[in-house]
Amino acid sequence: MKKIAIINGPNLNLLGTREPEIYGNQTFEAYFKQLQTKFPNVELTYFQSNVEGEIINKLHEIGFSYDGIILNAAGYTHTSVSIADAVKSITIPVIEVHISNVYAREEFRHKSLIAPNCKGVITGLGLLVYDLAIESL
Ligand code: DQA
């Protein structure tokens, strides 16, 4: 069975209540259960942290043994050299995802430091981006 991890960065623990007009009404925990039901042949794990170093530690921990990582680094996407370096340092494929269309938003969201080190990027389709990333892996 393939092992795929979803890693969500800062403020994504507030999905469902945070800016619902941008991010929707569903909690990630509820959505994650749906994903597990939809992909019974994939061993899915979910990790969320608001702390940059914890995200890096998780990437190091699983980045040589799992089959893939779906990473929504949230605001760190646009600022974190260290998360970008961590993605480059590990050996398994990483897909960057964003719930909102970052290109339709403020200019500072148009730049991802992480994307050049990823296998692909999916942005702007709501929570469906996670389904599509799993399918692709
Ligand atoms: C986000 C987009 C980022 O720009 C933002 O900082 C987030 C969420 C998204 O999923 O749309 O926190 O990664």
Image (cartoon, rainbow, N blue to C red):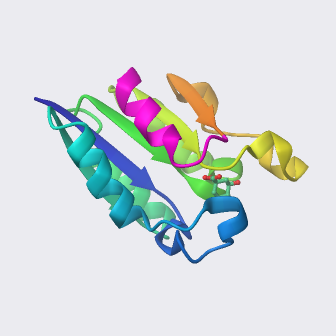
Residue 102: image quadrant is top right
Q: Quadrant of the N terminus?
A: top left
Pinpoint residue 128: horizontal percent, then vertical percent. 50, 41
Q: Quadrant of residue 123?
A: top right
- Judged left or right of residue 68, residue 72 is right
- Residue at 84 percent of width and 44 percent of height: 104
Ligand 1, seen in the image, is in the quarter at bottom right
The picture places residue 44, in percent across and down from the top left corner, at 23, 44
Question: Residue at 55% across / 52% down in the picture?
Answer: 73
Q: Please tell me which residue is depicted at 27% across the width and 56% down the height of the picture.
A: 33
Query: Observer-nearest residue: 113 or 106?
Result: 106
74 with respect to 2 (left or right): right
Instruction: Classify 99 as above or below 118.
Output: below
- Kindly tell me whether residue 89 is visible in this rendering: no
Where is residue 22? Give x, y as percent.
70, 61
Residue extending farthest to the left is: 1
- Judge left or right: residue 104 versus residue 67: right
11 on left or right of 19? left
Task: Judge whether 49 appears above or below 31 on screen.
Answer: below
| Visible residue check, residue 133 | yes
**Residue located 89% across and 48% down the image:** 107
- Image quarter hosting the C terminus: top left
User: Disc count in the image?
Assistant: 0
Rendering coords of residue 56 (x, y %) = 41, 53
Predominant secondary structure, magenta span: helix
Residue 127 lies in magenta, yes or no?
yes
Of residues 95 and 29, the one drawn nearer to the viewer in this rendering: 29
Quarter assignment of residue 130: top left
**Residue range corresponding to the magenta coloring:** 124-137
Q: Is residue 64 magenta?
A: no
Q: Please, is residue 26 above or below residue 115 in the view?
A: below
